[in-house]
Image (cartoon, helix red, strand yellow):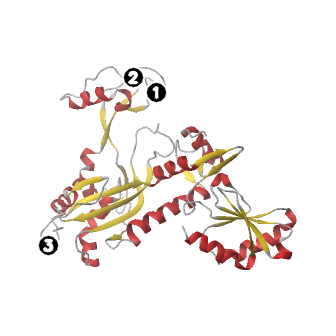
């Protein structure tokens, strides 16, 4: 077993889960698009999150707010003022570096506690050119901004959201009124967020553009019993009440908020690392069947069987409730079942079904194949 991150990154590139972004133009550094396997895995993950937190919950509802964010929202939330990293610029290679990457933890905290932020203990060398010659530290805001250009005269400055939850907070009152939800209840959202990281040294899934799955659970101040990632109190709703001059209370009380927040890409990476295994000569992704990019693959054993196998694939496409792929029998991308079409398949009207993990084989009649596989899928 070999599971280090470098291997997983190469593995994901090799099999096309990850595609280097804008590769035909030389690419943006450390930016990735997802190929078909990565895309289906991500969709499955989000689907399961949504089902668990929203669809099957009697408490929670969903929302979908814009990525483009009114500057006042981030003024109220404190992001405009406080959402920053300290950076220094290398005087030799001009690259920007995060100050906390060039100091040990103690050194960084002692820097932060100083009144005058010009002095700091000895920095490590520049990771890009190995010199030690830096500009004085300064703050770098992590918000990404853009312009809407609605009018030529006025400045039309907006941000791209740094977290999905602010869209939930500013819509809280309207959602509560339109759904008549009583406390406690939650609002969930899945979507892209943006952070203008200075450096991207940390692997394949620390990127400026990323996706979040967030649930904000609102309750009366003494009702908190949910296990949580983050206790946000009523800070956000209070701030938005103050800045918008709108009453965001429910029955005169500003609810408290507990937040459950996931980064989709980071969770994907953790799952992929956990699922990867080597058995003798084969590499397998033992993904949960509901996460596997393709639940079933249809494979002809010989070129002569392609027409029959492809017809079977086309017939099945509209009958099954899962992702089906033709021609790619791949343990390496986590496909859960492989349907093999052999020379007996047409005369006998039967195929061989092979299970990814156990390699067990079952002969199944073509007439009952769709129903059989749907039932298997629904059992998970
Ligand atoms: Zn340098």
Does 313 sit left or right of 64 as displayed?
right
- Pick the residue in front: 249 or 346: 346
Mark 1 and mark 2 in contact (Cβ < 8 Å)?
Answer: yes
Of mark 2 and mark 3, the one earlier in the sequence is 2
Q: Residue at the location (18% across, 29% down)?
A: 115
Q: Secondary structure at mark 1?
A: loop
Some atom of ligand 1 lies within 8 Å of the CB belonging to the residue at label 3? no
- Pick the residue in front: 325 or 237: 325
**Quarter holding residue 174:** bottom left
Some atom of ligand 1 lies within 8 Å of the CB belonging to the residue at label 1? yes
Q: Residue at the location (46% across, 39% down)?
A: 200
Q: How crowded is the residue under tag 1: few (<14 C-alpha within 10 Å), some, or many (20+)?
A: some
Q: Which residue is mark 2?
A: 124
**Quarter holding residue 292:** bottom right
Q: Secondary structure at mark 3?
A: loop
Q: Residue at the location (38% across, 64% down)?
A: 189
Q: Residue at the location (32% across, 29% down)?
A: 105
Q: How crowded is the residue under tag 2: few (<14 C-alpha within 10 Å), some, or many (20+)?
A: some
Q: How crowded is the residue under tag 3: few (<14 C-alpha within 10 Å), some, or many (20+)?
A: few
Q: CA distance from mark 2 to mark 1?
A: 8 Å
Q: Secondary structure at mark 2?
A: loop
Q: Nearer the viewer, mark 3 or mark 1?
A: 3
Does 289 sit left or right of 360 as displayed?
left
Tag shown at residue 251 = 3
Q: CA distance from mark 3 to mark 1?
A: 55 Å
Q: x, y percentage for residue 96?
A: 41, 33
Does 79 sit left or right of 356 as displayed?
left
Q: CA distance from mark 2 to mark 3?
A: 55 Å
Q: In the displayed structure, would residue 111 be above or below residue 31? A: above
- Pick the residue in front: 235 or 215: 215
Q: Which residue is mark 1?
A: 127
Q: In the displayed structure, would residue 362 be above or below residue 130? A: below
């Amino acid at each position: 077993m070999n599971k280090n991150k470098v291997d997983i990154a190469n593995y994901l590139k090799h099999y096309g889960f990850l595609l280097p972004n804008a590769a035909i133009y030389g690419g943006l550094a450390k930016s990735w698009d997802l190929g078909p396997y990565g895309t289906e895995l991500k969709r499955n993950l989000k689907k399961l999150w949504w089902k668990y937190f929203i669809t099957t919950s009697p408490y929670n509802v969903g929302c979908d707010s814009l990525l483009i964010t009114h500057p006042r929202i981030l003024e109220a939330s404190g992001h405009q003022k406080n959402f920053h990293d300290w950076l220094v610029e290398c005087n030799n290679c001009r690259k920007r570096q995060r100050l906390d990457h060039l100091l040990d933890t103690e050194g960084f905290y002692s820097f932060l506690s100083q009144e005058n932020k010009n002095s700091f203990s000895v920095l490590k060398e520049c990771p890009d050119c190995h010199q030690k010659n830096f500009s004085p530290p300064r703050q770098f805001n992590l918000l990404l901004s853009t312009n809407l250009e609605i009018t030529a005269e006025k400045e039309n400055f907006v941000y791209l959201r740094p977290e999905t939850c602010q869209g939930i907070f500013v819509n809280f009152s309207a959602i509560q009124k339109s759904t008549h939800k009583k406390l406690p209840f939650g609002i969930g959202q899945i979507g892209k967020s943006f952070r203008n990281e200075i450096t991207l040294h940390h692997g394949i899934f620390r990127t400026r553009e990323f996706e979040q799955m967030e649930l904000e659970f609102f309750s009366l101040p003494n009702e908190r019993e949910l296990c949580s990632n983050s206790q946000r109190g009523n800070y956000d709703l209070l701030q938005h009440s103050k800045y918008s001059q709108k009453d965001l209370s429910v029955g005169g009380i500003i609810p408290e908020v507990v937040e459950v927040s996931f980064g989709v890409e980071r969770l994907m990476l953790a799952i992929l690392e956990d699922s990867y295994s080597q058995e003798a000569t084969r590499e397998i992704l033992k993904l949960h069947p509901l996460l596997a990019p393709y639940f079933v693959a249809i494979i002809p054993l010989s070129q002569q069987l392609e027409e029959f196998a492809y017809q079977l694939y086309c017939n099945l496409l509209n009958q099954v409730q899962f992702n089906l792929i033709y021609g790619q029998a791949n343990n390496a991308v986590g496909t859960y079942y492989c349907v093999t079409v052999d020379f007996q398949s047409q005369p006998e009207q039967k195929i061989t079904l092979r299970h990814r993990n156990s390699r067990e084989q079952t002969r199944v009649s073509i007439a009952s194949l769709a129903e059989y596989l749907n039932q298997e899928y629904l059992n998970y």
